[in-house]
Amino acid sequence: MIIVLKSEAEQPDIDAVCDLICSLRFKPRVSKGDKDVVISCIGEGVSPHAMEVLRSLPMVDRVIPIQKKYKLVSRAYHPEDTVIDINGVKIGGGNIPIIAGPCAIESYDQFRTAVKDLVACGIKIIRAMPFKPRTSPYDFQGLKLDGIRIMRDVKEEFGVSYISEVPGVMQIKMLIDVVDIIQIGARNSQNFDLLENVAYYGKTVLLKRGLAGTIEEWLTAAEYLAACGSPNVILCERGIRTFEPATRNTLDLSAVVVAKELTHLPVIVDPSHAAGKVKMVPALARAALAVGADGLLVEAHPDPIHAFSDAAQQIETNKFAGFMDEIKPWLELAKGLPRK
C-alpha cells in the first residue's frame, strides 16, 4: 500500500501517519520527491479497514493499494528515477557510465595493466573480481585474498572505484572496505540469505538477473535488498538461458524496457556475458543504449587469448578506445532518450 500525502504536509504530519502505520502492524518507508511525500507500508494483508483509516487522515491525499510483491523499488513508490553516485560517477537519470575490467584478477601486472589502459579511456569504475564462482570446481576460482591485496595497491595508485562479486556470505567482510559496488551474480540472484547479509552493510549493489529469472523475480530480489538496508540497487540484464546455442545467453532487451517502466532503479546491460563472443559485444552494447539502458558492464583484458576465464568475450584493453569510439554516437543519443 502506498500513501501519498498532500503537498502542504509537514514533518509532524509525516510522523503522525508513520505512527498510525506502525500501530496497524506495518513498517513505514518515507520517500520525499520534488512535489510529493510518499509513504510505503511494508507488510502483508492490507485490510479495507486499514485503508479507510489512512484515507481519513487530513493530510493524506490518496491511498493506493499495490498488489505487486515489490513495493520499495516500484515507480508507484518513487516515480522519479533514482540516481546513484559512486565517488562522483552518477548512474541513472540520464547518466550513462561504462564500467569495464577483466573477468578475473589473475596477477598484479595483468590487473594493473587493465586498469591503466581503461583509465586512459575515461573508465572510472572497474570490474575487480578476486572471487570467481564457477560451474566446475576445477575451473579458476580467483586469487581470493591475494586478489584483494592487488586491488588495494592498484586502487591507491589510480584512485578508481571497484565493483566486485561476492559469491557467499563469508566473502562480504573481506571485500567491504575496498569495493564501492557489491555485485550479486546471476547464480545468486535468489540467494536470499546472501541478499540480506549484503544489504546489512548498506552499500550500492549491482543485481544481475538470474539465469532463467523472470522480471518479477529480479525485481523481488531487489526488494529484498531495499527492504533490508540497501536502497541503492543497480539492475543488470546479462542475458537469460534459452534453447538458442549461437550466443552464450539470449540478451533480453525487452526486459530493460519493462524494468524501467516498473522500477525507479537504474538498469544497465552486460553485453559480454550475453554474447560470449567479443565480436558481438559492440553491436549488443549499441542496442542496449538504444533501448534506454542506464549503462554498460563490459569485460576487458590486456591479453584475452591467455585469460584464465571467459577469454572469448573480453575486449583487449589497449583496443578499448576503439570500442568506445564505436558506441559513442549511440551513447550521445541515449543521453537524450526519455528515461521511462
Image: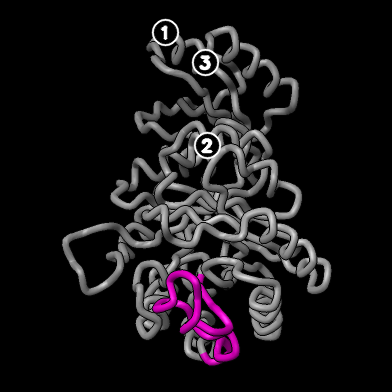
> Which element carries disc 2, helix, strand or loop?
helix
Question: Picture coordinates of residue 199 (x, y %)?
Answer: 60, 37
The residue that mark 1 highlights is 49
- Give, as a single range, the part of the protein colored magenta: 298-322
Q: Are there few (<14), some (14-19), or many (20+) residues within 10 Å of tag 3?
A: some
Image position, residue 41 (x, y; %):
52, 23
Q: Answer above or below: position of 297 versus 213.
A: below
Which circle marks residue 194 in the picture? 2
Q: Residue at x 48, y 42 (%)?
A: 222
Amino acid marked by disc 3: Leu
Q: Secondary structure at mark 1?
A: helix
Quarter of the rendering containing residue 254? bottom left
Write down the quadrant of residue 190 in the picture.
top left
**Where 144 sits versus 330, above or below?**
above
User: Which numbered disc, 2 or 1, marks the residue that appears first in the sequence?
Assistant: 1
Alpha-carbon neighbours of circle 1 within 10 Å: few (<14), some, or many (≥20)?
few
Magenta stretch holds residue 321: yes
Task: Decide if residue 265 is in sight here.
Answer: no
Identified by mark 1, the residue type is His
* Left or right: where 308 falls relative to 281: right
Q: Secondary structure at mark 3?
A: helix
Residue 296, which numbered label? Answer: none
Camera-side residue of 313 and 142: 142
Q: Earlier in the sequence, mark 3 or mark 2?
A: 3
- Which of the two discs, 1 and 3, labels the residue nearer the N terminus? 1
Q: Is residue 269 left or right of residue 276?
A: right
**Is the C-beta separation of discs 2 and 1 under 8 Å?**
no
Of 270 and 257, which appears nearest the observer? 270
State the image quarter where residue 60 is shown. Answer: top right
How much space separates mark 3 and mark 2, taking CA atoms?
Answer: 35 Å
